[in-house]
Image (spheres, grey):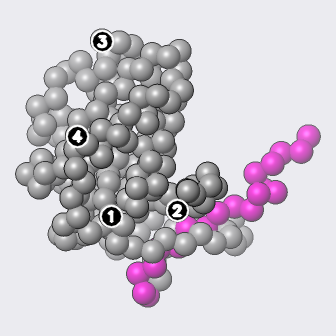
Amino acid sequence: MSSLKELILKNRSYRRFYQDVAIPVETIKELIDLARISSSARNSQSIKYIISNTPEKNALIFPQLSWAGYLKDWNGPVEGERPSAYLVMLSDTRVTDNYFCDEGIFANNILLGATEKGLGGCIVGSVERLKLQQALKIPKHFKIIQVVALGKPKEIVVLEEAKDGNIKYYRDANGVHHVPKRPLDELIVDL
């Protein structure tokens, strides 16, 4: 069993996948259950999920997403490298119109669970929400928060120390995705 730190180190934002590796609904429900049992602000538990793991439904979601803003010459994964599943995270406004920080807690726990299962994913916040709402015929009392893309990772992501404050991720000539991280001492404010 991996330690928590090992899981966190493996839990990267993957954007290229083995699209043909299906993720069963049961596995996706196990990941949602990790979110369900997580801490929730005011214990409101107002976030709901649309599961997508079929090529037909995935094809409705993919065009509504934007990928990797720092990679200006890349429009997202090509056919064959797209996620094999998605979770569309929704705010159920019938419960509350303020989900506070739950979306981050829930998405991270979903991705840690996916990592533990040998999968990976990416939280996609750049979403054409109105178009996706229409494409999936989502009732108006649900508001799209973000989309979690899931699949079997098809890329290598490495962490490195940020140099001169540059934290923009990039891909090298071999397609390896590099993610600069600020040094720990830069994050601690000593007053």
Res 160 visible? yes
| Residue 73: in magenta span | no
Q: Are marks 2 and 1 in contact (CB under 8 Å)?
A: no
User: Gap in Å between the C-alphas at discs 4 and 1?
Assistant: 17 Å
- From this view, report whether residue 71 is shown above or below residue 190: below
Q: Residue furthest bottom?
A: 173
Instruction: State the SS at label 1.
Output: loop
Q: Mark 1 — residue?
A: 152
- Give the residue drawn at x 22%, y 44%: 25
Q: Are marks 4 and 1 in contact (CB under 8 Å)?
A: no
User: Could you tell which of marks 3 and 4 lies nearer the N-terminus?
Assistant: 4
| Residue 178: in magenta span | yes
Q: Quadrant of residue 80?
A: bottom left
Instruction: State the SS at label 3.
Output: loop
Residue 69: x %, y % from top left: 41, 60
- Kindly identify which numbered label has been placed on residue 61: none
User: Gap in Å between the C-alphas at discs 3 and 4?
Assistant: 20 Å
Residue type, numbered disc 2? Lys
Range of residues picked out in magenta: 173-191
Res 146 visible? no
Q: Mark 4 — residue?
A: 51
Q: Mark 2 — residue?
A: 10
Q: Nearer the viewer, mark 1 or mark 3?
A: 1
Residue 156: x %, y % from top left: 45, 74
User: Gap in Å between the C-alphas at discs 3 and 2?
Assistant: 36 Å
Task: Give the camera-side residue of 38 and 128.
Answer: 38
Instruction: State the SS at label 2.
Output: helix
Residue count near mark 1 (Cα–Cα under 10 Å), binned few <14, some 14–19, many ≥20: many
Residue 43: x %, y % from top left: 50, 16
Please give the count of numbered marks on the rendered protein: 4
Residue type, numbered disc 4? Ile
Q: Mark 3 — residue?
A: 94
